[in-house]
């Protein structure tokens, strides 16, 4: 863990995701492989911190915040970003990670909840050819305005947005396996630990795709 660079773990996570996508595409077609969703959660750590709760100073467990980019049809995590102070309203970091790995993000379809209804997300998506669907925030019954926000929200589809619910499957799966706890103490080790949890999840999803191939047979048209 100390000697292996974080980038190696990130690439392993991407490769398993892509292998699962290849298996799915061979049997069911490639139509939905470009559909992704972004969501975030917080995992408990072993350390304690002081916090003011109900006007009293108490101890509580620290949390590690994560954002994930999930390929919906295969239930695999394509990108993951984490830290104690992770911005869980920012989808640019995940897409930029994917772009930096040499993979194209153009024409990706990404769905996110209203927490990501922020100007800079719309601007980044529009400039990079990402098809974004975000449930709009309302202020006094009206949507927020802005050049990029208005342009993207004009194409908002409630039917497309309903697919976002599937992004919560990886969190549920990982919670059942290890309780969504991270036991490393150093920030860099926590980050690697989160990626390893994503890799373990992707491995199980890969074997699930492989199992579908043993159950179903593709019939030539």
Image: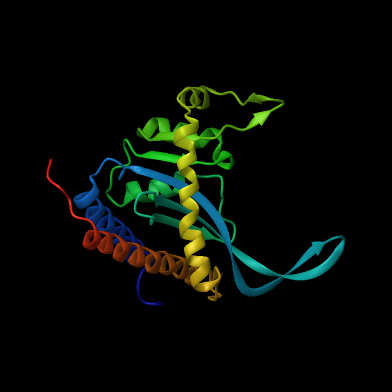
Q: Look at 47% across and 56% down and name the residue there.
A: 169
Tell which of 159 and 140 is nearer to you.
159
Vertical position of residue 133 compared to residue 177: above or below: above
The picture places residue 73, in percent across and down from the top left corner, at: 35, 49
The quarter of the picture where residue 118 lies is top right
The residue positioned 15% from the left and 48% from the top of the image is 219
Note whether 49 is above or below 157 in the view shown. Answer: below
Residue positioned 37% across, 66% down in the render: 199
Is 32 on the left-hand or right-hand side of 216? right
Residue 160, image quadrant: top left
Residues 192 and 188: in front is 192
Looking at the picture, how far across and down is residue 88, in whole percent? 56, 49
Q: Nearer the viewer, residue 121 or 5?
A: 121
Q: Position of residue 147 (x, y in %)?
A: 51, 22
> Where residue 166 appears, x then y in whole percent?
46, 49
Which residue is depicted at the point 50% across and 60% down? 171
Report the side of 131 relative to 58 (left or right).
left
């Amino acid at each position: 863990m100390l000697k292996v660079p974080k980038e190696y773990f990130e690439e392993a996570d991407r490769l398993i995701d892509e292998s699962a996508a290849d298996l799915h595409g061979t049997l069911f077609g490639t139509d939905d492989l470009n559909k992704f969703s972004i969501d975030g959660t917080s995992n408990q750590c072993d350390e304690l911190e002081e916090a003011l709760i109900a006007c009293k100073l108490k101890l509580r467990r620290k949390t590690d915040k994560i954002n994930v980019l999930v390929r919906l049809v295969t239930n695999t995590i394509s990108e993951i970003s984490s830290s104690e102070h992770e911005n869980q309203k920012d989808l640019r970091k995940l897409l930029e990670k994917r772009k930096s790995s040499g993979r194209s993000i153009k024409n990706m379809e990404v769905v996110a909840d209203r927490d990501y209804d922020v100007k800079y997300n719309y601007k980044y998506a529009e400039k990079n050819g990402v098809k974004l669907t975000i449930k709009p925030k309302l202020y006094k019954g009206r949507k927020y305005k802005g050049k990029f926000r208005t342009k993207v929200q004009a194409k908002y589809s409630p039917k497309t947005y309903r697919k976002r619910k599937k992004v919560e499957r990886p969190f549920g799966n990982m919670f059942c396996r290890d309780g969504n706890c991270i036991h490393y103490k150093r920030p860099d080790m926590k980050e690697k630990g989160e990626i390893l949890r994503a890799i373990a999840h992707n491995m199980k999803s890969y074997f699930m795709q492989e199992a579908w191939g043993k159950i179903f047979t593709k019939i030539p048209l």
